[in-house]
Image (spheres, grey):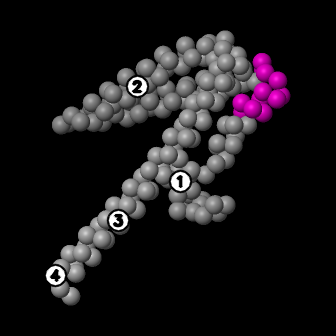
Amino acid sequence: MSKRIITILLIVSLAFNIAVVTTMVLRYRRFHNNEQKEMLQHFQKMKKIHPEVHNKYKKRIQTINEDNRKEKIKFMQELVKENPDYDYLETSVEKIQAFNSKITKNIHEEMISLRKNISYQQAQEVFGFHLKNMKKERPGRRNRGHREGEMPPPPPEH
């Protein structure tokens, strides 16, 4: 083949690859933006149902989130040091896990408190949305490399 034909094929191939990658990126972004918008709208609606319940837990969780963020920053600062203190890093991991546990507990307590104050129909609307999203398979998250409906192998026993 002549050099000219190879150059043309190379350019066509490059253009095709750019088009495919661009299409994939745009679809991915559109999918996730729509999903995030839907989730945000749902949370706004949920806050309006019983704002006093939400506000009570919001104040508590803001403090925990801020402490968690500060601890994560300290952890990362220690990691980048020339000679990190590994005992501190292990302690920091435990603190971060404790903060995450408190955050999760507060969220679940808020859900229980909210459920005590809403009707069955509202519960279906509010918590059904979360249940639907929890069941939804998300690319790149759980069950990587497995077809829909196929369970991943169990973790090895030690």
Determine the CA span between mark 2 and mark 1.
27 Å
**Majority secondary structure in the magenta region:** helix
The residue sitting at 72% across, 24% down in the picture is 112
Q: Given this view, does label 3 or label 2 mark the residue nearer the observer?
A: 3
Q: Is residue 38 left or right of residue 88?
A: right
Amino acid found under the numbered disc labelled 2: Arg
Q: Given this view, does label 1 or label 3 mark the residue nearer the observer?
A: 3
Between discs 1 and 3, the one toward the N terminus: 3
Between discs 3 and 2, the one toward the N terminus: 3
The kind of secondary structure element at disc 1 is loop
Determine the CA span between mark 4 and mark 1.
42 Å
Amino acid found under the numbered disc labelled 4: Lys
- Circles 2 and 1 in contact, beta carbons < 8 Å: no
In percent of width and height, residue 52 lies at: 67, 11
In percent of width and height, residue 13 lies at: 31, 71
Label at residue 139: 1
Q: Which residue is mark 3?
A: 17
